Structure formats: C-alpha cells, structure tokens
C-alpha cells in the first residue's frame, strides 16, 4: 500500500521524532494514516481552506479581479483569495488576502459561496464585499488588478472553476438583488475535470 | 524565537527528508514557517474544518445529540461532527460524521452555521438535516444518543460553545420558520474564553 492509493500527500519522516513513518489504520479508525513506528504519533491530513472576496464597486457594479503573477495559473484572472492562516477567522482571511493581492480596502458583506474541491482537498469560501475606494494596486502575487463589468469579464481566462462559478452566481444574484431579492449563500462541488 | 511565539504547532523534523526544521520567514512571505535547513521544504500549517449536522426529527421538532465517549469533553453533549477528511466534500463529511457518531441516516438541508474558532485554528460548519428514521444508535465515540426538544436541551452540559450557539440559533430560526421565514446562514467568531 502506498500513499498513491490513498488521499494522503506523501510523508516520509515523523515531524516529531524524525524516524520513518508507515501507512497504517490506527485502532478505532477506518482510514490509512501516516503513523510513526518509533514514537507512535499519528499524522492526520485534512482539507485546507482558501478564502477570498468578491470586491464590488457599487457605483457601476464592476468587480475587482487580479491577474496571477504566480503558479498555478500564472497570467490568468482570479478573485483575490488565498490559504487561510492559523489564528485568523474566515472574514480576516478574506480581508487580508484582498489587501495582499489587490491592495484593496473592503467592507465585507457576508458569505456568498462555499465550493468544495475534493480532489485537491480544498474548500473555497468567497465573501461579498464593497470596495471602499479605488486606490487598489497589484500586490507581489498579482501582475495587475482591474475592475470588470459583467460583460467585460475574461471568462476564458479565469484561473479556477471555483472563481468562474462564483462570478456567474454573483452577477445572477446582483440582477435579482436589483428587484429586491436577497443575496443567496451558494454551495457547489467542483469535481475533477477529465483531461482529454 | 520559538513556536510558542507563533500560531504554529510544534514541529521538529522535516517530514520529507527527516532533517531538523527551523523557524524562518521565507522570501515573499510575511509569517514564520517551519523550514527545512537541508532540503528547503516550507511546511505550512492551516486551520482545520470540523463539520457536522443538526439532525431534526420533524414530527415533534426534537434534535439528536450525542454524549461524548472521548476527550476532549468526555461525557458532555454535542451535535454529531468531526474533522473533515481529505477527498470529501463538506456535505459528505457532515453525513459521514452523523452516521459514525450517531448511527443516524439524514437528508441534508443546507448550511446553517459557520463558526470560527481562531485560537484552536478551526472552522466549524453545521448543516441542517432531517432524520430519515429513528433507528439511530451510539457509535464508538458516543456514550449515548438521544432526541431533545428545545426545553430539554442540557445547556449546562453542552461540549463546545460552537454547538451551544448553533443550537440556540437553530431553535430561534425554527420558530421563525413556522411563521414563514427562511432559515438563515449564521456566522460567528468564538474567541478564547479567559479562565478565572
């Protein structure tokens, strides 16, 4: 049995004692884990959260996107988002990532989408947000940041399916909102796309 | 600088190559990480998700709780919930934990609460759910499982603040729902309680 047969990322050595780990199902468990044969530590792996915002400039209903300066998907457009850090809340993560990637100050308005991406062990959360001013600027992980109306969104050059789906749902809700509907909270599962 | 000064859990050795790690701020980063001095691997740590359900027996509006057979909070009551696993979605995690801890079959009805617990690097999600039958039974991590009306909930013996808050919000929404209001999606931050 190798890590390739499990949803675990490879692990060779125990991070506590430095001795080799092996794959075992611990007592009272049903899944393979990396277990240290020396000190017995069980090394669990769990999904990570990617948290971001949908920064709306309300005057003309444009949304702020960032063009990625890093891999994966260098050169493609995304909403400002990134890995949530220890000791912060989801709202703090969304606000921080929006500042780091887009230099943008926002007021958060509520959770908008929860996107499961199980084949990469991630959950993506996007919060609605209002841009407080137009003094945004690309951070080190962005090539450029720019406001887009719905009909200007570069749909073919969006970096991730979770971002494309969130944007489509958002512009739909924005139209419904004009006729008095509240914004929804949307949940979607993004399954692995088969490569041709 | 020690790990105690950071939000990082202790780490001694590189899980890739087995050599010692040290705390450093990598290039293009702003936070201390465990970095391997031998192979250069940066070991990121991120919050974990705890996902569960609020299983409602609709005939008499009772909710299913589990009395914990494990630490922390052995003997206290909780909603069925647990750490999300790699390769699953949040809905799959909620359904699986409800089966594992309470032996209960449910139909999920939608996200109800998102609770940040930043001092333990966790985000708790609870989904509304309808119990499909009354054939539930305590799993290995539960001493007993039992249905409670709102006025029967053992509020002083609830295991975690995220569960108590979720239950209070749920019964409030349940009353509002009777008069035609939709259920909300509630977000709360649970900060560290100072011990006396």
Image (tube, coloured by chain):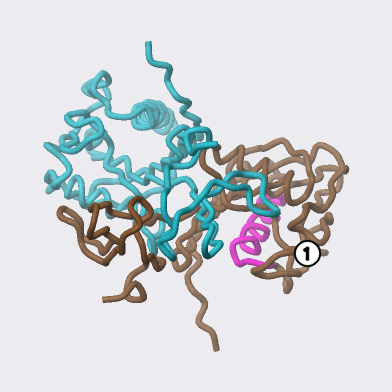
Chain colours: A brown, B cyan
Magenta-colored segment: predominant secondary structure: helix
- Chain letter of the residue carrying label 1: A
Q: Which residue is mark 1?
A: A153
Figure quadrant of the N terminus of chain A = bottom left
- Reply above or below: A73 against A87: below
Task: List x then y, in percent, for residue A113.
Answer: 57, 51
Task: List x then y, in percent, for residue A33.
Answer: 28, 61
Nearer to me, A16 or B116: A16
Residue at (32%, 44%) from the top-left corner? B53
Task: List x then y, in percent, for residue A94.
Answer: 63, 44
- Reply above or below: B126 against B72: below
Outermost residue on the bottom side: it is A196
Task: Tell me if B84 is positioned left or right of A159 in this view.
Answer: left
Outermost residue on the top side: it is B196
Q: Which element is circle 1 on?
A: loop
Residue at (44%, 64%) from the top-left corner? A118
Residue at (77%, 62%) from the top-left corner? A67
Task: List x then y, in percent, for residue A138.
Answer: 82, 53
Q: Is residue B182 visible?
A: no
Q: Residues within 10 Å of mark 1 (few under 14, many from 20)?
A: some
Residue at (40%, 54%) from the top-left corner? B90
Task: Tell me if A37 is positioned left or right of A49 in this view.
Answer: left
Q: Residue B151 magenta-drawn?
A: no
Write the start and end of the magenta stretch as one range.
A159-175
Nearer to me, B41 or B84: B41
């Amino acid at each position: 049995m190798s890590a390739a047969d499990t949803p675990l990322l490879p692990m060779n050595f125990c991070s506590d004692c430095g001795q080799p780990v092996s794959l075992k199902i611990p007592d009272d468990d049903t899944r393979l884990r990396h277990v240290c044969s020396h000190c017995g530590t069980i090394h669990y792996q769990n999904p990570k959260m990617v948290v971001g915002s949908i920064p709306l400039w309300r005057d003309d209903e444009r949304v702020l996107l960032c063009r990625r300066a890093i891999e994966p998907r260098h050169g493609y457009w995304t909403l400002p988002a990134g890995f949530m850090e220890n000791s912060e809340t989801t709202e703090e993560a969304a606000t921080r990532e929006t500042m780091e990637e887009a230099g943008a100050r926002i007021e958060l308005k509520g959770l908008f989408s929860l996107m499961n991406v199980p084949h990469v062990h991630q959950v993506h959360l996007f919060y609605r947000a209002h841009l407080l001013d137009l003094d945004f600027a690309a951070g080190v992980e962005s090539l450029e940041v720019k406001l887009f109306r719905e009909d200007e969104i570069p749909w073919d050059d969006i970096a991730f399916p979770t971002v494309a789906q969130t944007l489509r749902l958002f512009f739909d809700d924005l139209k419904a909102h004009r006729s008095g509907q509240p914004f929804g909270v949307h949940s979607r599962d993004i399954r692995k796309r088969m490569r041709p």
